[in-house]
Amino acid sequence: MKKLFCNKMLFVITIMFVILSILFFEFGYCNPNWLVNCVLREQNISYNFSLIRIVVYFAIITLVVLFNKKFIDKAIDASQNKYKRILIYITVSTTIVLLIFYLITILTPKTIEETYIPMINSIILTKSPSIVITTSMIIRAITVLIIALFASSIFIIYVSNDIVYNFIIIICTFGLVFSITTDFNHTIDESRHFATAFNVANFNIRYSTEPITDNAIKEIPQHMKFIAIDNYLKNKYVSSVYKETNMDITTLPVNYLFISYIFPAIGIFIAKTIGGSIIDIYIIGRIFNLILYCILGVIALKLIPFKKNILAIILCTPMLLVLAASYSIDGFCVGTCFVFIAYCLKIYKESDSITLKQTLILLGLFFLILTAKSMTYMFICIFALILPIIKTLKKNKKYLPIIIVSIVILLILLIAMGIYTKRTQLFSDVRGGNTNSSEQIKLLLTNPIHD
């Protein structure tokens, strides 16, 4: 069985899984109605063609061909572990079995209509009478499951002892899956971030005072499930930009600097220029935001001199991956924060003092953080003082008690200030909902394992 783990065989398996994922996405995710009706031969359903999707497919295959050797060599080294080989066999076998089940399901769509749909609707209608499951929804849901299994198989094959490579693999597998499965406009924040990126893509950087919008954007509902996007895939996007006069909170751009939205804006601009549906444009923008997170994460992992595993685990937590694979500004903010922290630790490890060049780099990184979250992350700047503070403490140990007392007093003052601003409503949270900080802290203290 070890013969399976050679360069050519791993390359063939990888290309096969990538191409199958693309085909499943194109037909099962973007054209489930057309697929089912081709099998039934009952009626003519138009095909949802998108040029931008074709371009992206070729780009993905090209990148896999160009960079496969570096990843395959590390995968082969890691495959010497017999437990990993067993895990690969199990995952690939499971994927193949479910793939066969999927093809049988597609070839017998009447089974879906006569068995699965009545059963699922009988469960759902008792809780949500307004939701009615259709054949296309079932096909798209199963398609996403298969694509997720392909992604899992590729991840397990290529996971190795190289932390940076593992991070890239996770972004290219699970990150991409999140970009198509997470609810569209999954929070009010995402719809507003999308509106901001859309403004930047249309070269309107005065969106805070003179925002523009589009009917296609306003029509995308909040929390739209990926199984219910048929109506937004049918037609090619046609620009109908106009100035926003109805200040609806869900379509109003957020008041952050345009720098944070350059990457998703590039994705939106490319997609709407080449041609695709509004869903294609939405997903491409998400992917470009994910690419930005990947770049920042790789830089941080390259810079940090120790504890790379801990940083990689944090970067790959599902919540951060979901945020990075959406229009949330948190992907950019978190990635930039980690680059800043990693660079501070690099200076601490390698230098006895901070040079002018290092100071300018730190100031530049800190400026990017402030553009993302204004003054919210001001206290992260203390990481830049890690070197002089530690050196000072080592030379002046007799002042350590005074320093500790000063820090405690400062923390007490900060907490008191926070309570005061909360009670006096000096600062308010415009998002609405359950944003009561006091109640949230109380919940965490009384139910520590709730989340």
Image (cartoon, helix red, strand yellow):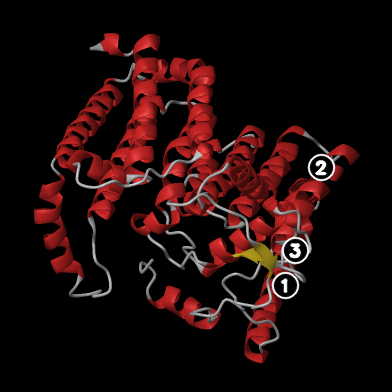
In this rendered view, identify the residue nearer to me: 356 or 424: 424
Q: Quadrant of the N terminus?
A: top left
Question: Which sits earlier in the primary sequence, circle 1 or circle 2?
Answer: 2
Q: In this view, does 95 lie above or below 113?
A: above
In this rendered view, identify the residue nearer to me: 133 or 447: 133
> Relative to 394, is 173 on the left or the right?
left
Residue sitting at 19 percent across and 35 percent down?
A: 103
Question: Which sits earlier in the primary sequence, circle 3 or circle 2?
Answer: 2
- Under circle 2, the secondary element is helix
- Under circle 1, the secondary element is helix
- Under circle 3, the secondary element is helix
Q: Mark 1 points at which residue?
A: 410
In this rendered view, identify the residue nearer to me: 403 or 141: 141
**What's the distance in space between the residues labelled 3 and 1, CA to CA?**
10 Å
Q: What residue type is labelled 3?
A: Ile
> Relative to 186, is 101 on the left or the right?
left
* Disc assigned to residue 403: 3
Residue ranking furthest to the bottom: 424
Q: Which of label 3 and label 1 is nearer to you?
A: 1
**What's the distance in space between the residues labelled 3 and 2, CA to CA?**
28 Å
In this rendered view, identify the residue nearer to me: 154 or 268: 268
Q: Is residue 305 above or below residue 184?
A: above
Residue sitting at 90 percent across and 40 percent down?
A: 356
